[in-house]
Image (spheres, rainbow, N blue to C red):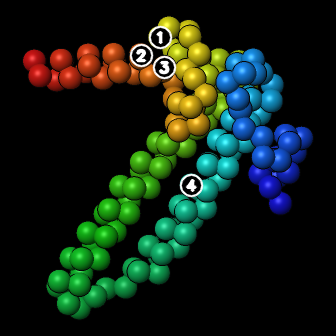
Amino acid sequence: MSVAEDWGSDLPDGYRPGAKEKFMNPKMREYFRLKLLAWKQEIIAESKLTLSNLQQENVAQPDLVDRASSEADRALELRTRDRQRKLISKIDAALRRIEEGGYGYCEDTGEPIGIKRLEARPTATLSLEAQEAHERNERVHRND
């Protein structure tokens, strides 16, 4: 079953947004909604697997080096899960913007973000130009 079928979408198989169609038309919004939902589902599935692995590895290891290595692996896995939890929040925010009609438009300028950028980063809230300006401004303030 495809993602479109999972969420009851009638989006044509193989559909990809094109530059020639009206920006953020219903079909394009549905495409990104499904993309975000599939990404979220994948992250949740990975999280469940990690939780299962962490519970199984909860065995005390007698060797100090093995124990240290295991703890380092565990800490890395927990940091990764925390990043993914934050990513789920961004995905949920993007899904809300789709519902409210603001998805795909730059929060700073109101201009379209661009299909290629949204394909690469579906949670983007800034156009490429606005993101670059934001990062330049961040560097300037960090160096103060």
Q: Which residue is mark 1?
A: 108
Q: In the drawing, what numbered circle is on residue 130?
A: 2
Quadrant including the N terminus: bottom right
Q: Which residue is mark 4?
A: 43
Q: Amino acid at mark 4?
A: Ile
Residue 45, horizontal then vertical, whole percent: 61, 61
The numbered mark, 3 or 4, whose residue comes first in the sequence reads 4
Quadrant including the C terminus: top left
Disc 2, disc 1: CB below 8 Å?
Answer: yes
Q: Nearer the viewer, mark 2 or mark 1?
A: 2
Asked whether residue 112 appears in the rendered view, the answer is yes
Residue at image point 44% right, 73% down: 54
The numbered mark, 1 or 4, whose residue comes first in the sequence reads 4
User: Which element type, helix, strand or loop, lies under badge 3?
Assistant: loop
Q: Amino acid at mark 1?
A: Asp
Residue at image point 85% right, 51% down: 5
Q: Nearer the viewer, mark 1 or mark 3?
A: 3
| Depth order, front residue of 79/17 | 17
- Distance of mark 2 from mark 3, alpha carbons? 5 Å
- Distance of mark 2 from mark 4, alpha carbons? 28 Å
76 relative position to 8: left or right: left
Query: Which of the 4 image quadrants contains residue 67?
Result: bottom left
Disc 1, disc 3: CB below 8 Å?
Answer: yes
Mark 3 Cα-neighbour bin, 10 Å: few <14, some 14–19, many ≥20: many
Q: In the drawing, what numbered circle is on residue 127?
A: 3
Disc 2, disc 3: CB below 8 Å?
Answer: yes
| Depth order, front residue of 117/104 | 117
User: Which element type, helix, strand or loop, lies under badge 2?
Assistant: helix
The numbered mark, 1 or 3, whose residue comes first in the sequence reads 1
Q: Amino acid at mark 3?
A: Ser
